[in-house]
Image (spheres, rainbow, N blue to C red):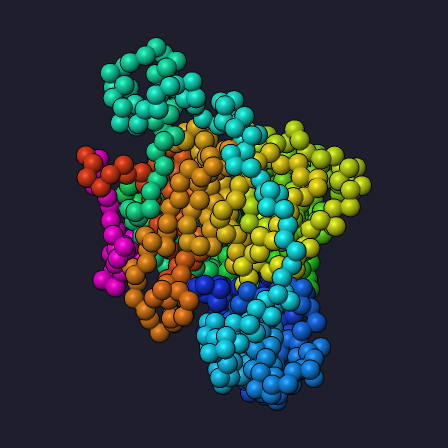
Amino acid sequence: MVRNAEGDQLQEGGSQHSDEESSTPMPGGWYHDHDHDEDGEDESDMLGDEDDGNVEFEVVFGGDEDDEDDEEYVDEEDDDEDEEGEDDDDDEDGERDAQTDAALRIMSLFRAGARQGLLTRAQLMALLRNRNLGQILFDEAGEDGEGEDILGQWTRRQRRPPKDPERFPKVPSPEGTKLMRSGAFGANNYDSRIKRQIGRRMLDRELGIGDREQRKRNNDIITQSLIPGTRAEQIIHYDNPIYSGQFSDDGNFFFNCCQDYKVRMYDTSNPYQWRHYKTVTYPFAQWTLTDGSLSPDNKWLAYTSITSLVSIAPTDPSDTGDPYTLDLSEGQERPGGWGMRGRGHFGIWSVRFSGDGRELVAGTNSHSIVVYDIESRRVLHHVEGHEDDVNAVCFADKSSPHILYSGSDDATIKVWDRRSMGDRREAGAFVGHIEGLTYIDSKGDGRYILSNGKDQSMKLWDLRMVMSTQRFHDMGRTRYAHSSGFDYRGEEYDDEDWDVHPHDNSLVTFRGHKVLRTLIRCHFSPPSATNSRYVYSGSADGQVYIWNMDATLAGTIDVKKATIGTRRVDRQTRFYFDEPGGWGTCVRDASWHPTAPMIVASAWNGYSMARGTCTLHSFNDAEGDEGTPGMGRSVDELLRPQPDMYYSSEY
């Protein structure tokens, strides 16, 4: 992505956008950032009033957030300046002085680029011109070893005191082990001295070995052992990144939300033979579709963007009329606001149907939660309940519309009782994340909830352990959040920034995945297909991570490996130096089929990660087994085979 000095895009599709969703990442840390910053300012504001004709190359290096006083941009005129505070008066070797100064200038450029996500042409040329670049970057020390010494001096200045390595959660988690043994999350075979393989258990089932209880447990263990693998049965290619994709509760329906402002629906009544069902468009979109939700009866689909408008479309393919539009701002006007035609004053990150299908709840970038009555078309509650964007909302129990949760960039989850939202006070809170939340998911039993956080952790919570409203307000929550200055859109998270929240009231903490670049989602595994045995999450490293409830890793699905090389390079995609072949993958969402051992991963994918895929992964015990042969299909959005789309070169 290239811009001129005024921040104007030199590529099609250049409308200005806001917040997290306007940052489409590039492989290995490169990203093009079309967004406004959090205050709604665009990049030309960030760059000041410079008009030097420079082209900015967007680059991310691992920076140090503590260096807040470094200069943000270094023009060509600044190449001869020494870094502030450097004292070279005592150095008698002039050549060493110049070499040291060059090293410090290079490191200053790195730090400036890391904070802004940008290097100007002047900065990039300054790096390339410097004859010491190779020595500093690649430890190419001279004959006297001075290059290595210079880099060591800079590194030592940036080093922070190490934290206690024992602060990370224990794996396996004691609390998670208790949950697994309780039977609430699947069957167990702890009391069995012989750990049987799945083939032996299937034989026992066919022969009817054991009493009724043993046969039931044996069947449950077989079911929950069928974890999908990396090999993709089907790869559906899209010309834009996919932001979400979910099965319906009965598994007969799958939909996804794409950056091209379209929702595509598929008939998955036969999960191994999909049919394209219908495609609907969002007419008021800003940057991308942010979320979608299917009504409990599968008849209506609500979807939205970074506006206050929600579209509701019928899923019936014979109904070709325009979708209904609901204004969650109740028609309030604000010239120059988020929505089209100046409508609305907030954008929606998350939307959900209530269990009875009569209401919608939405989380917004105005720090608020909106409850909307569909039948009367009016806002029932609009509560500014957080100190930052509300990235996720959900209901606690699918059968009840009363208890709902909201997760925010202020690093908290709040519990709301619909019957008492009029006083604008939460019913309770969960704390434990030290960075903002990207997603929350309810198990649907009114008790357990799962959250993903930008602190690179996923947490399990129990409603019975919720913190009271009074205690939450007394503890001074803001002291424990946003302490690192970490920007997940373009930086790698430093584990040295991670620490235990002093008031953490979560049950289990899961780690290992990468919650970077976008609002990555997590879920409970379905009760029918897995006995609710697992939790799983997408990841910015191109994988789906699946954990047992004790925080041990049950499996991974490598979507990048399954898709790499399946699409040609075209005019709109480019190679980047730090990804092999330029191919990048970020799994933003994943959905486990309710009754079949199958996961669909929705991802940003392809060269420069500018495209999207939905990949279908199923359980396959061995390549040569007697089961149904793999589908091995690579198709377009309408499920049509295309000559320029391939099956992964890794298989």
Estimate the x, y position of residue 650 in percent, counting from the top left. Answer: 27, 55
* The stretch drawn in magenta includes residue 643: yes
User: In this orientation, does residue 223 appear?
Assistant: yes
User: In this orientation, does residue 303 appear?
Assistant: no
Estimate the x, y position of residue 410 in percent, counting from the top left. Answer: 68, 51
Q: Residue furthest top?
A: 211
Q: Is residue 388 above or below residue 296?
A: below
Identified at 50% across, 77% down, the residue is: 144
Residue nearest the viewer, comparing 90 with 362: 90
In this rendering, the count of numbered labels is 0
Q: Is residue 368 above or below residue 271?
A: below
Identified at 50% across, 81% down, the residue is: 132
Question: Which SS type dominates the magenta stretch?
Answer: loop
Identified at 39% across, 64% down, the residue is: 579
Report whether 483 appears left or right of 301.
right
Please state the extent of the stretch shown in magenta in the rendering: 627-651
Report whether 645 appears left or right of 419.
left
Residue nearest the viewer, comparing 8 with 185: 185
Estimate the x, y position of residue 447 in percent, counting from the top left. Answer: 59, 30
* The stretch drawn in magenta includes residue 359: no
Identified at 41% across, 22% down, the residue is: 189
Quarter holding residue 431: top right
Estimate the x, y position of residue 490 in percent, counting from the top left. Answer: 54, 63
Residue nearest the viewer, comparing 14 with 166: 166
